[in-house]
Image (spheres, coloured by chain):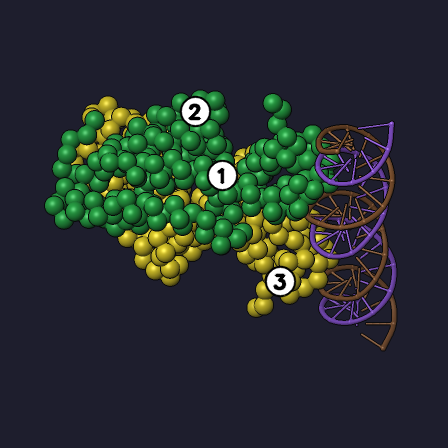
Chain colours: A green, B yellow, C purple, D brown
Amino acid sequence: MNPSAEDKIKAAALQVFLQKGYANCTSREIAREAGMNVALVNYYFRSKSKLFAIVFESVMNDFMHSMVQVFSSDLPIRSKIELLIAREYEFLALHPEIPNFVLSEIERNPNSMDEIKPMLSVILKSGVLEEVELLQKKGEMRSIDMVSITLLLMSNCQFPFMAKKLVHAIHGIELAAYENQLQNHREHVVQMILNYLFPNEAHG
Amino acid sequence: MNPSAEDKIKAAALQVFLQKGYANCTSREIAREAGMNVALVNYYFRSKSKLFAIVFESVMNDFMHSMVQVFSSDLPIRSKIELLIAREYEFLALHPEIPNFVLSEIERNPNSMDEIKPMLSVILKSGVLEEVELLQKKGEMRSIDMVSITLLLMSNCQFPFMAKKLVHAIHGIELAAYENQLQNHREHVVQMILNYLFPNEAHG
DNA sequence: ACTTAATTTAAACAAATGTTTAAAAAATGG
DNA sequence: CCATTTTTTAAACATTTGTTTAAATTAAGT
């Protein structure tokens, strides 16, 4: 069955918002992308900002869903990290605009992150924190706070996708070749982070 | 001596452009920040986009200047990396908006990076590439391409400053405490990267 | 087939924004 | 002190943008 007008608008809005950001695009642009009139956008979604809120929530859900799964699994912590990085690289290969999209929205509306808090609490309840603490106490894992661990993972997963054009400017690497570069980089990231967090073990 | 009107506008524009980005601020906002009329902005700089170009160039120069210095020094490669990270953390502590500012501008105007090419060629001529290649051939440094090295450095230096509010949303860490967190994180980054690039040596 | 509701469109509105104009005010210099 | 240039201001202009309105078209139900 054909997608409804409402769905077409939502899909167009996703595309345009991801690519240009909230402030950098217009309602008419979204309508055009969906192949319809401007007024229809507001007929179905009342306003540009309401439409954006819906798109944003859906993006955040998709993005977090996979993460929560990994944390809720009963894999050992090292595998969790490995899987987390793999999943994030897969996901961002499809939607490389998302990190910037999310960071921009936090800047625009500091409350926008309230939605993810339920999902964060699921992760907290998974017992990862306790697992990390225990391993650190046993000396099997480097003593390093959770904030820094989070930063290491996010930095090395998200930034490479944000910096596509910057790397192109610096190294002249073509955007097509960059896809391979990213997969190559992922392996470095996994090894580097595992080596650092678990200094006593032999890795790849 | 008092700053001239022109300088006041430039300073105001720097502040506003850094904080809100090109599309997200208005000429009137810049004028207000400088304490003057809108028309004066265009009297001195002809247009919003010309003013932005001037501000952007000045930011890029400041940012690159310190990097070029490090590469041009005759320190061994490990010290260069250490110093590079230290400098970048110092610089971004003062201007944490710059990474996003630069990435946004590349997206808006792909030619904007042409200005840094002269400075890049200075770095190329410094002989770092050859130094890395030699060390890798001798097995003193891990075999890893320059693009990935660049990505590791940029990711772990720039992203932590971009993610301030995201980390606040996730971990509840206050923005004031985050300054300390960042300095703490810097040490992890230095060790992690050096450990990975020079696996045969003992580090801190 | 007819009525009613839902969808779509073109047009209009008000507010905001980059830019320009023309006049006022201040500074300069002989 | 006056003439000329430079700086500053208020106002206006044209365009864009989010949103609304009212009419037209289509779909649904009976």
Amino acid type at circle 3 is: Ala
Q: Nearer the viewer, residue B29 or A83?
A: A83
Same chain? Circles 2 and 3: no
Residue at 44% over, 43% down? B64
**Circle 1 Cα neighbour tier, 10 Å, few/some/many (<14 / 14–19 / ≥20):** some
Q: Is residue B176 left or right of residue D2?
A: left
- In the drawing, what numbered circle is on residue A59? 1
- In the drawing, what numbered circle is on residue B8? none
Amino acid type at circle 2 is: Glu
x then y, percent, for residue A39: 73, 40
Chain label for disc 1 = A
x then y, percent, for residue A87: 36, 31
Residue at 20% over, 44% down? A131
x then y, percent, for residue A27: 67, 41
Image-quadrant location for residue C29: bottom right
Question: Residue at label 2?
Answer: A179
Q: Nearer the viewer, residue B59 or D16?
A: D16
